[in-house]
C-alpha cells in the first residue's frame, strides 16, 4: 500500500518551486494518497510553492479549493494546477491558479543588422551581341548593349538587356519558370522561358522598357512606366 | 612611308566589295597617294577585271608567297595613274594557298613603300576572310541596304571586334534615295542604328558603276558621277580629311546640279 502510494505521488523540483505529479488511478484513491504523502513529508514541503499535476482527472472547483486550503494550512502555497482535462483547467483558472508551468524564455539572440544583400550568380556583358554570337551562362545575364538579330542569349536565370533586344533569347533554360526577360526595347526574333516558346503580342506604338515572364503557361508582358 | 592597311569586307557576296576596293584605291591614287591593291579572293579573282588589268597578269600573290617570283614581279602598275599597283589573286588555287601570317608578312614587306594597302576580302567568314583581315590596320565593312546584307555585316563587325581589329567603319553601297523616301528600302539611319559603327560613306545606286566595271574603267576615274563622287569622298575621309556626307536627295534643281558639277570638277 505504501509502495503504491509512493508511486502514485511524485515530487520534483521545477524552476518556480515543486511539481507534484499524480499517476493514473481513481481520484478517490489518489486524493487521500496525495494528502498522506504530503503530510509525511511536511518537513521538506513546508514553505514551498507547489504546482500540482493531476493528469486526466476531473477535479471540481470545490475540491481544488479544499486542497488549496489544506495546503495553506500546512504552510504550502499551491500556485498552479496542471491538467489535461479542460474542465479542471477552467476550474483552476476560476480559483486564480496558474495552469501552466512557466518555461524558461528562450534566450533572445540579437543578430547584427543585415545590411549586405546576398547576390546571385550573374555575368555582365559590356558589348553588343551581334549576329552569330552567343552568350550562354547558367546564372543571370546582364547585357550593357544591344542584342542584334542573329545574336543569341541563353541564361539559366534572368536576362536583362540595357539596350535593344532583337535577337533570340532563352531565360531559365535549366527549367526555371520564374525567369524573366527585360529590355529597354523588346523586339526579339524568338523568346523562350524555361524551354517554352513564348509568343509576344505585336508591339504597337513607341517602344518602351518591357518585361516578359510566364504565369500559368501564359506569357505576360509588362511595360515599365515611370511614376509621375 | 608606312602604309595603312585597309581591308574591305562584307560577309555577304555581291554587295560591291571589289568595286568599292577598286574605286577607293583609284580615288586615293588620284589624291596623289601611293596605293597597292591586293586581291584576297583566291580562286575567284575579280579585282583585276574591275581595274581593267586582267591581261597584264603574269604572277600572282600565291606565286609570291610560294617563292616563284619576287614581290615586285607580281605588282602590276596601273598606267592611267601615277602610283596604283595591283597584286592579283591566283585563279587556279583556293583560299588555303595563303595563311593569315603570309598576308601579314606580305603587307609588312609592302608597308615602307606605300601610303595605302587596300585588300579586297572574299565573301564569307572563313579562311579567305581571316587572311584578309589579319594584316589590317583598318577594316571597312561594305553593305547594301538589304536585311540579309546588313545581317551578315553585323556578324562581320562582331568578328572584326573579336579579332581586335575594330572598330570597323561602314560603307553603305547602292542606296536608292527614291526608294528610301518611299520607305521601300532601309534608310542609312536604320542600318547605322543596328550596326552602331562609324559611317565612312554612302554610295548611291548608279547605273554608271555597272558600265564602268564592265569596261574595266573604275568609275572613280570619272568624278562627274554620283557614285564616283561618293568614292572620292570616301578616299578623302580615309586620308584623314573631314568631308561632309553628300546629300542623297534625288530631286535636284538646276542650281544644285550645277553646283555639284562644279565641285566634282574641282576635286
Image: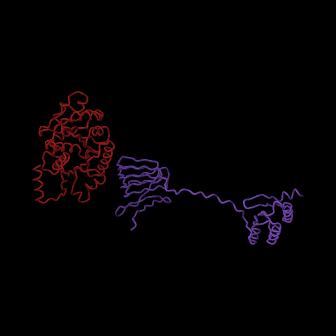
**Count of marks placed on residues:** 0
On the picture, is B163 further left or further right than B85?
right
Residue B22, picture quadrant: top left
Q: Residue at x 78, y 58 (%)?
A: A12
* Pick the front one: B55 or A28: A28
Question: Which residue is farthest right?
Answer: A1
Q: Residue at x 46, y 48 (%)?
A: A138
Residue A219, picture quadrant: bottom left
* Pick the front one: A95 or B78: A95
* Pick the front one: B50 or B128: B128
Q: Residue at x 83, y 66 (%)?
A: A74
On the picture, is B149 further left or further right than A199?
left
Which coloring applies here? by chain
The x, y position of residue A194, in whole percent, is 48, 53
Question: Which residue is farthest top?
Answer: B68
Q: What color is chain B drawn in?
A: red
The x, y position of residue A108, in whole percent, is 61, 58
The x, y position of residue A61, in whole percent, is 79, 71
On the picture, is A19 further left or further right than B95?
right
Q: Is residue A211 above or below residue B169?
A: below
Q: Is residue A56 above or below residue B245?
A: below
Q: What color is chain A drawn in?
A: purple
Screen quadrant of the N terminus of chain B: top left
Amino acid at each position: 500500500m505504501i509502495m503504491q502510494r509512493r508511486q502514485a505521488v511524485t515530487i520534483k523540483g521545477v524552476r518556480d518551486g515543486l511539481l507534484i505529479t499524480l499517476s493514473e488511478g481513481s481520484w478517490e484513491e489518489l486524493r487521500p494518497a496525495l494528502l498522506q504523502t504530503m503530510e509525511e513529508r511536511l518537513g521538506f514541503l513546508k514553505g514551498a510553492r507547489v504546482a500540482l499535476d493531476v493528469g486526466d482527472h476531473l477535479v471540481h472547483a470545490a475540491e481544488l479549493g479544499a486542497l488549496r486550503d489544506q495546503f495553506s494550512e500546512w504552510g504550502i502555497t499551491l500556485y498552479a494546477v496542471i491538467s489535461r482535462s479542460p474542465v479542471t483547467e477552467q476550474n483552476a483558472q476560476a480559483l486564480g491558479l496558474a495552469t501552466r508551468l512557466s518555461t524558461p524564455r528562450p534566450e533572445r539572440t540579437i543578430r547584427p543588422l543585415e545590411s549586405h544583400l546576398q547576390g546571385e550568380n550573374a555575368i555582365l556583358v559590356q558589348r553588343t551581341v551581334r549576329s552569330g554570337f552567343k552568350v550562354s551562362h547558367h546564372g543571370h545575364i546582364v547585357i550593357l548593349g544591344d542584342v542584334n538579330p542573329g545574336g543569341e542569349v541563353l541564361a539559366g536565370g534572368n536576362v536583362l538587356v540595357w539596350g535593344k533586344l532583337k535577337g533570340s533569347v532563352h531565360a531559365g533554360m535549366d527549367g526555371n519558370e520564374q525567369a524573366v526577360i527585360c529590355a529597354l526595347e523588346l523586339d526579339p526574333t524568338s523568346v523562350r522561358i524555361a524551354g517554352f516558346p513564348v509568343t509576344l503580342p505585336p508591339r504597337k506604338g513607341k517602344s518602351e522598357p518591357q518585361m516578359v515572364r510566364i504565369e500559368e503557361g501564359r506569357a505576360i508582358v509588362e511595360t515599365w512606366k515611370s511614376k509621375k | 612611308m608606312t602604309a595603312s592597311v585597309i581591308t574591305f569586307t562584307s560577309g555577304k557576296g555581291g554587295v560591291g566589295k571589289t568595286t568599292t576596293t577598286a574605286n577607293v584605291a583609284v580615288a586615293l591614287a588620284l589624291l596623289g597617294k601611293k596605293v597597292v591593291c591586293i586581291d584576297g579572293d583566291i580562286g575567284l579573282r575579280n579585282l583585276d577585271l574591275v581595274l581593267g588589268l586582267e591581261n597584264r597578269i603574269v604572277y600572282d600573290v600565291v606565286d609570291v608567297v610560294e617563292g616563284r617570283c619576287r614581290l615586285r614581279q607580281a605588282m602590276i602598275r596601273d598606267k592611267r595613274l601615277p602610283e596604283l599597283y595591283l597584286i592579283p589573286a591566283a585563279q587556279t588555287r583556293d583560299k588555303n594557298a595563303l595563311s593569315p601570317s603570309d598576308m601579314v608578312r606580305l603587307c609588312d614587306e609592302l608597308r615602307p613603300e606605300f601610303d595605302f594597302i587596300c585588300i579586297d576580302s572574299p565573301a564569307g567568314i572563313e579562311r579567305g576572310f581571316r587572311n584578309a583581315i589579319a594584316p589590317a590596320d583598318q577594316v571597312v565593312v561594305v553593305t547594301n541596304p538589304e536585311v540579309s546584307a546588313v545581317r551578315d555585316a553585323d556578324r562581320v563587325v562582331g568578328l572584326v571586334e573579336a579579332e581586335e581589329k575594330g572598330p570597323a567603319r561602314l560603307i553603305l553601297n547602292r542606296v536608292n534615295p527614291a526608294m528610301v523616301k518611299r520607305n521601300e528600302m532601309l534608310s542609312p539611319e536604320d542600318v547605322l542604328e543596328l550596326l552602331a559603327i562609324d559611317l565612312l560613306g554612302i554610295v548611291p545606286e548608279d547605273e554608271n558603276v555597272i558600265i564602268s566595271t564592265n569596261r574595266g574603267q573604275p568609275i572613280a576615274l570619272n568624278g562627274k558621277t554620283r557614285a564616283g563622287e561618293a568614292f572620292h569622298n570616301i578616299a578623302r575621309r580615309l586620308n584623314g580629311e573631314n568631308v561632309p556626307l553628300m546629300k542623297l536627295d534625288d530631286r535636284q534643281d538646276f542650281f544644285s546640279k550645277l553646283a555639284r558639277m562644279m565641285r566634282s570638277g574641282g576635286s
